[in-house]
Image (tube, grey):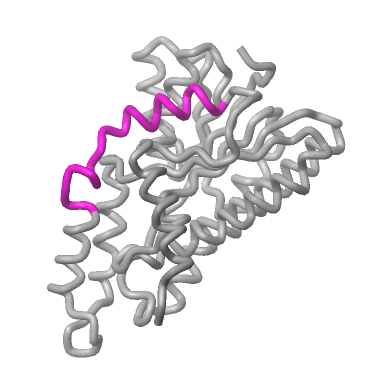
Amino acid sequence: MATYKTILITGAGSGFGEGAAIGLAQAGYNVIAGVQISPQVTALRNKAQQLGIEKNLRVEKLDILDSYDVKVALNWDIDILFNNAGYGESGPVSEIPVDLLKKNFETNVFAPLALTQQFVAKFIAANKKAKIIFTSSMGGLVAPVGLAPYCTTKFALEGIAEALQQELKPFGIQVQTFNPGGYFTGFNERVGETAFRWLNDEKNFTKRVDLTAQLDLLIGNDSGRLDPKEMIDAMIKIVPSDEGKFRNVVPQFIEDFLKDHQLKRWEDTI
């Protein structure tokens, strides 16, 4: 077992965050599961009690956009900050209302960065070896039509993580990203629904039927609905380890696709 002891996971009220929190607690690590809303606190505490891991899994309300929640969280003594909280906007980048894109960046980029900066300052002041992890996405390396607004936030997160890795290495603070493929947690489906709040066939040149067809191509098939246990198992193994890769793409066929995609981008013409 690695030397890291206490792990704070944001966005742990569902999906990868919840699965990783439970798995890491079952593995014997001390986990603080930060969830966005109070009902998630009750639900996950009950689940921890049912699983007999309540001593290792502490559940707290931590909305990363709530300054009061963040202030409380900064008092916690942790070794690993796992920035997993996030949400997504869908639709065409050429037409999405910019205020919605700003909101998506606030949650996926600015709030995690602000939380990270404050914990990093604590780690460095205490001369503490620590780790920062970000849940990015395969969408941090490719921006398909339909899901591109969400993907742009992950592109930004990739740049932040790359810079932090170089800046914090001299202080003994490690940085990693997770880049999940199309796992069926319900997250991608919820992202896909967001554009239909504002997309209007009478006003927009992108038509609802065309966006629906595009989203079906991306997430309405087996490659877009993978078993999330594979990603959660990888997180449980990688999060507490003091060795590993900076970027962690799962599954392997998505890593192969992304590498091929990025090479082809160099040959693209207009």
Q: Is residue 226 toward the left or the right of residue 149 in the image? A: left
- Residue occupying the point 28% across, 76% down: 198
Q: Which residue is rendered at x = 34% and y = 14% of the image?
A: 50
Count of residue discs: 0
Magenta stretch: give its range. Answer: 219-239
Q: From the viewer's side, name the closer residue of 163 and 133.
A: 163
Vertical placement of residue 140 versus 244, above or below = below
Image coordinates of residue 77 in percent, x first then y, are 71, 28
Residue lying furthest bottom: 203
Task: Please report the residue visible at 24 percent of the width from the left and 61 percent of the height from the top.
Answer: 193
Front residue of 12 and 156: 156
Q: Give the image location of residue 48, x and y in percent.
A: 41, 19
- Residue 173 screen position, x and y as percent: 74, 35
For the N terminus, the quadrant is top right
In the rendered view, does 211 fall on the left or right side of 77? left
Residue 236 to residue 208: above or below? above
Q: Is residue 224 magenta?
A: yes
Residue 86 colored magenta? Answer: no
61 or 131: which is nearer to us? Answer: 131
The residue nearer to you, when weighing 155 against 67, is 155
In this view, which residue lies farthest toward the front?
267
The C terminus lies in quadrant: bottom left
Q: 25 above or below 11? A: above
Is residue 18 shown above or below 190? Answer: above
Q: Residue 177's spot in the image, x, y percent? A: 55, 42
Give the main secondary structure of the magenta stretch: helix
Residue plotted at (56% across, 55% down): 157
